[in-house]
Image (spheres, rainbow, N blue to C red):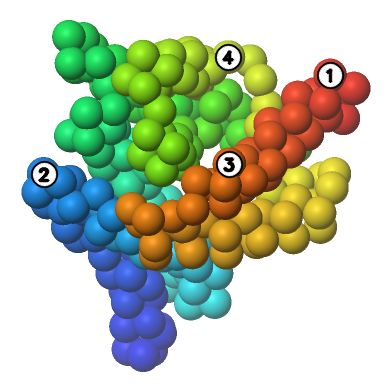
Amino acid sequence: MSLGRRAAAWAVHAYTASGAVIALLALVAAAEHRFGDVFRWLGLALFIDCTDGTLARAADVKRVVPQYDGARLDDIVDYMTYVVVPIFLLHQAGLLPPEWGNWVAAAPLFASAYGFCRSDAKTEDHYFRGFPSYWNVIALYAYALQTSPAVTAAWVLVLSALVFAPLKFLYPSRAPYFRTSSITLGAIWGAVMAYAIWTLPDTPSLLVWASLAYPAYYCGMSFWLQATGRS
């Protein structure tokens, strides 16, 4: 194996691992109550997560460095950026009830620890099994809309329970049905949310409310596909 190919493979793994550094920077920002910066760091982490798989396949990392488990690294980083940082932000921003916020925050940490370790978290027919721990999205909406601590806690507890539910949620890039529409609408939603994050904390609330159309589509389509036997 050439030195160049090995270097490229390790560079991809380093690219994935940089998400852990970004998580640390986001945690520091949250501790300092720079919540807009937290979401900007999480946006960068999301970009890395969306692109490292393509780079890994291009560099053929599994064959070039077979002794290193990139999927495990990806899960570790994702747990930090999709779970730990967003939940810490909810806590620091006062978006959880002060009397029992610690207990509410514990629920998604435990639930997602289970979800990330399931060998069947991604189904053979290309869905996520149970709520796929999109806590960064939940935290963004809670912060941008300044939902009350009670409402935020209710959503966090319900979605934590749904991690264990026998439900299937769309995996947009590999969905067997409506893949093109899901990816297209997701790209539009992503652009809108990028603008929303960039303009925090002064994002127009109407824009944030309107952007909920895509999460509604995502959940509605997931449930409809399962109810009609298409999952």
Q: Sequence-wise, which precedes: disc 1 or disc 3?
A: 3
Contact (Cβ within 8 Å) of mark 3 with mark 2: no
The kind of residue tagged 3 is: Trp
The residue under label 3 is 209
Badge 3 marks a residue whose secondary structure is: helix
x, y percent for residue 83: 34, 36
Q: Which mark is residue 165?
A: 4
Q: Is residue 77 visible?
A: no
Calculate the distance from the C-alpha at mark 1 to the C-alpha at mark 3.
27 Å
Q: Residue at x 57, y 51 (%)?
A: 207
Nearer to the camera, 187 or 23: 187
Q: Sequence-wise, which precedes: disc 2 or disc 4?
A: 2
The residue under label 2 is 31
Q: Residue at x 44, y 55 (%)?
A: 203
Q: Is residue 168 visible?
A: yes
Q: Which mark is residue 199?
A: none
Q: Which mark is residue 227?
A: 1
Q: Residue at x 22, y 28 (%)?
A: 94
The kind of residue tagged 2 is: Ala
x, y percent for residue 54: 55, 69
Contact (Cβ within 8 Å) of mark 1 with mark 3: no
Contact (Cβ within 8 Å) of mark 2 with mark 4: no
Q: Left or right: where does residue 194 sit relative to residue 228?
A: left
Depicted 100 relative to depicted 118: above or below: above
Calculate the distance from the C-alpha at mark 2 to the C-alpha at mark 4.
33 Å
Residue 110: name its quadrant: top left
State which quarter of the image contains the N terminus: bottom left
Depicted 230 relative to depicted 80: above or below: above
Calculate the distance from the C-alpha at mark 1 to the C-alpha at mark 4.
14 Å
The kind of residue tagged 4 is: Ala
